Image (spheres, rainbow, N blue to C red):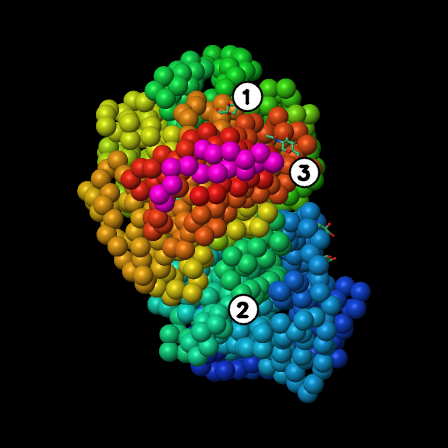
């Protein structure tokens, strides 16, 4: 959250206008290492010179770890150096730089790393000796991105064969084979016998090795430039001391037979990534981008460096597979993408400012499996509190206790369910986190207890910038856990509270001190207070690109430059651990919202898309942004409904709630300068439209919670792109305005345009039932259909073949629904088949990890039988709530139903039950069955 207030904060610092202005951010040409790597890649394409080769004598296969170690040697040949004014030229001696590499096989993936043996560089080392900085390249990104709970199985090499100029490697089942070329270092990767990817195909491999500024010319290859190697002349980062000079790493990957690539959030851009030739590369650099630009490759708040490629070999239809390139580097990173449609190959070029090359390349047969593999490595999304997938009401700001309790009771009076209410910045005493404004919130515990009666929760904002000079920041200084400036003293920058310090949560001591702050702030027994970590990119008002100077120093002597994109994760993960520990007596799952994120953030947080604007374009963009995060392993995402800044018109609010009810994280939020817009304040018909939509979200909670659980086990998206579920249809590859909800069969296309009362949706063959009427629509072959959508309707279908569960009665909160019975909606396929499932647990604690959950499956067979099958029963049934089914709705579709009763068998008893035969549907009321025992319904 950033505001016009920022104008005040910044008035003396930089001129800053209200809307987001790109000039604050570097373009590739203004970024030293991006400029240099693009320059190098252009030149090397022409010269085709090779400077990197594998030293075959260094090959060393460690059979304990199953890792192949070797050295790649970078050779800078003796060559003439011509200076800018063309008058002086001289030559250098040949220089050899050792770059240790590793190659290992993970479960259907290849890991390749490349470091620089800086400690061997006796020629220059002493010029870089420092008490403050580690000389090593930062290689601990995986400490944060990989799931610490997961012991990644490293497969044995089946083959490790050294031929002349080629080392052949393959995994156990030989599904993945590598050819590593020695003289001209490159790696070809074959998946199922077919060339799938080439690393260093275009010779863009570039490791800018350690050198003295004085000798920079001697260390440059003829294809390289020295642009901003030891200085930064970008207007807002001129103070960067660049202690190691140029140290970027870059590599190209060619995806063979792939014409569609996705991923690398966060960008406000289409799901299908765009070609970057002749324009800016996509940039991953976590920054605060208030009112960010749309349809843009500019960096945003978070970074997940995972690129997903669909591979189709047109000559063999079933030869379809998916690859994933995970570039495990937390530094400022740019990615160029070139589609080459003639050759059916996609070329990518990855450039990071520092750190090592650490890349994991996945191959799977389907997109869903790719999400699974990626989250095997980086961790599954946490299963959230059931209440946190309800509705969240937020505003900057609810001013005091009375304000909060008034919103609370007005929601109830107007039959609008909600579970979370939020306090932004201003609840604090003078923007000092871990305090409450004394007059406005004199008794926070009392407020929490009042909310707790209906199972409701409060979230407050706590950011990593800590106001200078109060007990909390003093504690940080005493314990030496503040991020330091390049001179090694605590860094002071400007943020909301004015002069501030930043907690260093890379440090175990920093994590411990952060935890102690929460120990004093949270209540062990009143466990409905949760935390929002905002501004954790980090956002620094007087910092370069509104963020941290890259020469700040973190624990371990690593520069901000190398760890930047993972900082936010260290903060929210540390916050999560603190909350978890404090609530451990009641075993309550924490809820943490973060703005900044990296690969792995899904393990502990939810995220939102930051400071959007109440316009139709931001509504439209929220959908591809959500889809992209979902396929990159971090599905618990939403956008501020109905736009953070500005005052949305009635129609936009209605459409935004209709889209927002599908966001995994469903929160309304508004800027301090906008008019109050709690839904009960709206005039009719808007108030009823919004109330009904929020109630619909609550009805669907059993289905949504089942999808969240599925995602927490498999890492699959919740809101799912069309092509993910139906990769066989190329027509779906660029669809990013309609989506499935996981594998539930729910198919939605929110309206994101003004004055639109009908829309075109694409359908694959099958039968689809419009949700409200259950009117069937039969599709023989893939086609577009016109769907009529007045303001009180959204295009919402259930695809034939699915059974979903709902809880239909309005209740004030998710907790109060737990005593209500379930309904089933059966949507048969053309031949009368349908399947569904429900996952339930207490929605609250970690007991589900010790078998305390219920797993029940439904199936319709041949249109004349529905069976219910129990897969898992918890020991403590009463904690899970009501398990009876009191309504079954069957979409009639194509099937001929003419009986008046059905036969129901549960346990050993058999009884009959009346069918109510309505237009489009059959209804069975009170069938007397439940989710505890198997049953059958026979028509
Ligand atoms: C050429 O440039 C070099 C350094 O870039 C400088 O030392 C030298 O004086 C220049 N020579 C002339 C003739 O300008
Ligand atoms: C990082 O490099 C150091 C020094 O070479 C090594 O000891 C350490 O194991 C590496 N850490 C990781 C996570 O690879
Ligand atoms: C990172 O992981 C490596 C290898 O697992 C370990 O040796 C190192 O201590 C870890 N670093 C931190 C800061 O925890
Ligand atoms: C579950 O719901 C049914 C139907 O409303 C009701 O008859 C039953 O008493 C409820 N059971 C529990 C345990 O609340
Ligand atoms: C059905 O059988 C199970 C044991 O198989 C028993 O626990 C349960 O009470 C029975 N339910 C009914 C409704 O009879």
- The residue closer to the viewer here, 430 or 230, is 430
- The residue closer to the viewer here, 119 or 902, is 902
- Disc 3 is placed on an element classified as loop
Q: How dense is the environment of label 3, judged by Cα within 10 Å: few (below 14), some, or many (20 and up)? A: some
Q: Range of the magenta residues?
A: 897-913
- For the stretch drawn in magenta, the main secondary structure is strand
Residue position for label 2: 251
Residue position for label 1: 435
Q: Earlier in the sequence, mark 3 or mark 1?
A: 1
Distance between the Cα atoms at labels 2 and 1?
47 Å
Distance between the Cα atoms at labels 3 and 2?
45 Å
Q: Earlier in the sequence, mark 2 or mark 1?
A: 2
| Residue located at (68% from left, 32% from top) | 875
Q: Up-down: is 360 above or below 466?
A: below
Residue position for label 3: 851
- Disc 1 is placed on an element classified as loop
Distance between the Cα atoms at labels 3 and 1?
39 Å
Percent coordinates x, y for residue 237 in the rendering: 46, 50
Is residue 894 shown to the viewer in this render? yes
Percent coordinates x, y for residue 725 in the rendering: 45, 56
Quarter of image, res 61: bottom right
In the image, residue 906 lies in the stretch drawn in magenta: yes
- The residue closer to the viewer here, 719 or 336, is 719
- Disc 2 is placed on an element classified as strand
């Amino acid at each position: 959250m950033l505001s016009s207030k920022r104008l005040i904060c910044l008035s003396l610092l930089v001129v800053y206008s209200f809307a987001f202005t790109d000039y604050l951010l570097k373009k590739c040409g203004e970024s030293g290492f991006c400029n240099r790597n693009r320059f190098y890649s252009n030149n090397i394409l022409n010269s085709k010179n090779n400077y990197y080769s594998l030293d075959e004598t260094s090959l060393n296969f460690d059979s304990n770890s199953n890792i192949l170690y070797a050295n790649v040697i970078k050779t800078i040949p003796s060559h003439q150096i011509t200076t800018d004014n063309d008058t002086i030229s001289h030559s250098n001696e040949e220089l050899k730089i050792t770059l240790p590499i590793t190659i290992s096989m993970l479960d259907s993936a290849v890991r390749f790393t490349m470091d620089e043996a800086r400690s061997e560089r006796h020629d220059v080392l002493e010029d870089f000796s420092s008490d403050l900085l580690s000389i090593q390249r930062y290689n601990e990104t995986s400490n944060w991105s990989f799931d610490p709970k997961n012991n990644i199985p490293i497969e044995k090499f089946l083959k490790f064969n050294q031929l002349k100029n080629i080392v052949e490697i393959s995994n156990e089942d030989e599904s993945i084979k590598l050819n590593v070329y020695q003289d001209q270092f490159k790696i070809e990767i074959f998946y199922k016998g077919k060339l799938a990817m080439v690393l260093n195909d275009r010779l863009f491999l570039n490791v800018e090795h350690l050198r003295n500024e004085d000798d920079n010319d001697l260390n440059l290859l003829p294809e390289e430039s020295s642009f901003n190697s030891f200085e930064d002349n970008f207007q807002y980062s001129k103070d960067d001391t660049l202690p190691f000079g140029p140290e970027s790493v870059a590599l190209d990957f060619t995806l063979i037979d792939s014409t569609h690539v996705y991923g690398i959030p966060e960008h406000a851009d289409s799901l299908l990534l765009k070609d970057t030739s002749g324009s800016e590369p996509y940039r991953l650099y976590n920054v605060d981008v208030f009112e960010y630009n749309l349809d843009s490759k500019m960096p945003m708040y978070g970074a997940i460096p995972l690129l997903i490629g669909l591979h189709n070999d047109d000559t063999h239809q079933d030869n379809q597979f998916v690859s994933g390139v995970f570039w495990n580097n937390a530094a400022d990173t740019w990615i160029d993408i070139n589609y080459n449609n003639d050759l059916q190959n996609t070329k990518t070029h990855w450039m990071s400012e520092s750190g090592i090359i650490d890349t994991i390349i996945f191959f799977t047969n389907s997109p869903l499996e790719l999400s699974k593999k990626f989250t095997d490595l980086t961790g599954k999304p946490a299963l959230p509190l059931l209440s946190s997938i309800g509705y969240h009401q937020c505003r900057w700001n609810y001013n005091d206790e009375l304000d909060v309790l008034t919103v609370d009771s007005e929601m109830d009076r107007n039959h609008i369910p909600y579970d979370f209410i939020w306090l932004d910045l201003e609840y604090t005493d003078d923007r000092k986190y871990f305090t409450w404004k004394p007059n406005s919130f004199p008794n926070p515990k009392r407020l929490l207890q009042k909310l707790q009666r209906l199972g409701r929760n409060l979230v407050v904002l706590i950011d990593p910038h800590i106001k200078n000079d109060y007990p909390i920041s003093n504690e940080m200084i005493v314990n030496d856990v503040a991020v330091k400036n390049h001179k090694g003293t605590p860094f002071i920058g400007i943020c909301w509270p004015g002069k501030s310090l930043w907690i260093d949560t890379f440090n175990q001591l920093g994590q411990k001190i952060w935890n102690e702050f929460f120990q004093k702030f949270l209540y062990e027994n009143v466990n409905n207070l949760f935390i929002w970590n905002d501004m954790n990119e980090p956002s620094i008002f007087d910092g370069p690109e509104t963020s941290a100077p890259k020469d700040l120093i973190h624990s371990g002597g690593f520069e901000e430059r190398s760890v930047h994109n993972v900082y936010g994760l260290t903060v929210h993960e540390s916050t999560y651990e603190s909350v978890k520990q404090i609530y451990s007596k009641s075993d309550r799952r924490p809820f943490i919202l973060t703005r900044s994120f990296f690969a792995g953030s899904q393990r502990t947080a939810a995220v939102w898309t930051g400071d959007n604007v109440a316009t139709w374009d931001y509504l439209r963009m929220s959908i591809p942004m959500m889809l992209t995060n979902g396929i990159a392993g971090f599905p618990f995402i939403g956008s501020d409904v109905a736009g953070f800044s500005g005052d949305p018109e009635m129609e936009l609010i209605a459409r935004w709630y209709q889209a927002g009810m599908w966001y995994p994280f469903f929160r309304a939020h508004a800027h301090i300068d906008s008019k109050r817009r709690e839904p009960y304040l709206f005039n009719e018909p808007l108030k009823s439209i919004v109330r009904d939509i929020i109630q619909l979200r609550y009805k669907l909670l059993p289905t949504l919670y089942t999808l969240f659980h599925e995602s927490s086990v498999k890492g699959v998206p919740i809101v799912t792109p069309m092509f993910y579920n139906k990769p066989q249809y190329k027509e779906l590859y660029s669809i990013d305005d309609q989506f499935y909800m996981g594998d539930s069969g729910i198919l939605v296309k929110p309206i994101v345009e003004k004055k639109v009362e009908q829309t075109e949706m694409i359908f694959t063959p099958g039968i689809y039932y419009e949700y409200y009427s259950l009117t069937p629509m039969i599709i023989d072959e893939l086609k577009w259909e016109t769907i009529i959508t007045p303001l009180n309707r959204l295009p919402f279908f259930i695809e034939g073949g699915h059974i979903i569960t709902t809880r239909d009665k309005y209740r004030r909160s998710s907790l109060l629904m737990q005593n209500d019975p379930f309904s089933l909606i059966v949507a048969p396929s053309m031949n009368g088949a349908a399947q569904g499932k429900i996952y339930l647990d207490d929605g609250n604690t970690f007991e589900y990890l010790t078998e305390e959950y219920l797993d029940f499956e439904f199936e319709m067979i041949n249109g004349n039988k529905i069976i219910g099958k129990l897969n898992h029963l918890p020991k403590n049934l009463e904690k899970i709530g009501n398990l009876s089914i009191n309504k079954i709705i069957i979409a009639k579709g194509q099937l001929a139903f003419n009986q008046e009763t059905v036969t129901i068998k549960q346990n050993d008893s058999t009884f009959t039950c009346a069918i109510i035969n309505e237009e489009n549907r059959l209804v069975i009321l009170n069938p007397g069955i439940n989710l505890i025992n198997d049953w059958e319904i026979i028509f």
